[in-house]
Image: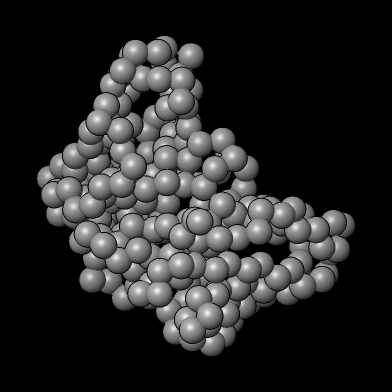
């Protein structure tokens, strides 16, 4: 079992709809959670970070964290075709001195115009 | 704002050759991470450095080595290249002790081993 699990998709939503991306993690001691967006062949781009239980909103994006359930999600409102990409959930693995990121396999989002 | 710089952006090598990838972190960032992303895979952590010292090691083959220099740039040295080493190699940087522990990724080096 991977330490960070995501549905690989593709998740297809129509333009203007809400896209919901989910992620679970196995290390109960994890403290930092990130959503990165990655276009094909490009580098991961930070969308959101979240550290506390509850919701965090930034523009059209809302991250939700539930540490008891070891679950983190990303909602994208008013989805646009330009949002079509792979969304990587990442968890900060506390070990060693520098906190490496453990990634899920990513969810491919396709926003249909 | 300044970003992480990686060079070269593309590299083609033959099997058993060596390759050196370079990473220049965001100014004032003292921590560098290297990740490898194979086709259709998620990024896998290779190695990290803080203040020029190796601080964590992941799934990095013994054929690979890396270091961080006094100006905080880092180099990933890869020897006896194999076909399976073909991947995107990302460097990320972070300012330890900053307000967040966010890692910022460079554009990556695409290594192709023929």
Q: Who is closer to the viewer here, B30 or A95? A: A95
Q: Who is closer to the viewer here, B76 or A22? A: A22
Does residue B29 appear left or right of residue A50 in this picture? left
Examine the image and state in which quarter residue B98 appears: bottom left
Examine the image and state in which quarter residue A12 appears: bottom right
Q: Position of residue A47 (x, y in %)?
A: 54, 65
Residue occupying the far front of the picture: A1
Q: Position of residue A16 (x, y in %)?
A: 83, 69
| Colour scheme of the picture | one colour
Does residue A77 appear left or right of residue B33 in this picture? right
- Residue sitting at x 60%, y 73%: A73
Q: A70 above or below B92?
A: below
Q: Who is closer to the viewer here, B58 or B70? A: B58
Q: A72 above or below A80?
A: below
Q: Who is closer to the viewer here, A67 or A45? A: A67
Does residue A109 appear left or right of residue A15 in this picture? left
- Residue sitting at x 43%, y 79%: A51
- Residue sitting at x 70%, y 70%: A20
- Residue sitting at x 43%, y 65%: A91
Judge whether residue B34 can be spotted in this image: no
Examine the image and state in which quarter residue B5 appears: top left
Judge whether residue B45 can be spotted in this image: yes
Does residue A61 appear left or right of residue B17 in this picture? right
Q: Position of residue A113 (x, y in %)?
A: 87, 57
Q: Position of residue B3 (x, y in %)?
A: 39, 52
């Amino acid at each position: 079992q991977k330490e960070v699990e995501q549905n690989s998709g593709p998740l297809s939503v129509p333009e203007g709809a809400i896209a919901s991306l989910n992620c679970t993690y196995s290390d109960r001691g994890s403290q930092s959670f990130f959503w990165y967006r990655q276009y094909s062949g490009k580098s991961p781009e930070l969308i959101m970070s979240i550290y506390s239980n509850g919701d965090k909103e930034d523009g059209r994006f809302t991250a939700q964290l539930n540490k008891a359930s070891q679950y983190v999600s990303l909602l994208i409102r008013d989805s646009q075709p330009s949002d079509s990409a792979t969304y990587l959930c990442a968890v900060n693995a506390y070990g060693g001195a520098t906190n490496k990121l453990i990634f899920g396999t990513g969810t491919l989002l396709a926003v249909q115009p | 704002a300044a970003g992480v710089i990686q060079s070269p952006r593309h590299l083609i090598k033959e099997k058993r050759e060596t390759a050196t990838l370079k990473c220049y972190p965001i100014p004032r960032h003292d921590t560098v991470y290297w990740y490898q992303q194979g086709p259709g895979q998620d990024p896998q952590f290779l190695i990290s450095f803080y203040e020029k010292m190796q601080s964590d090691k992941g799934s990095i083959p013994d054929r690979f080595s890396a270091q961080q220099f006094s100006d905080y740039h880092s180099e990933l040295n890869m020897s006896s290249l194999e076909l399976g080493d073909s991947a995107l190699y990302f460097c990320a940087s972070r300012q330890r002790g900053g307000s967040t522990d966010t890692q910022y990724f460079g554009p990556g080096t695409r290594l192709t081993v023929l």
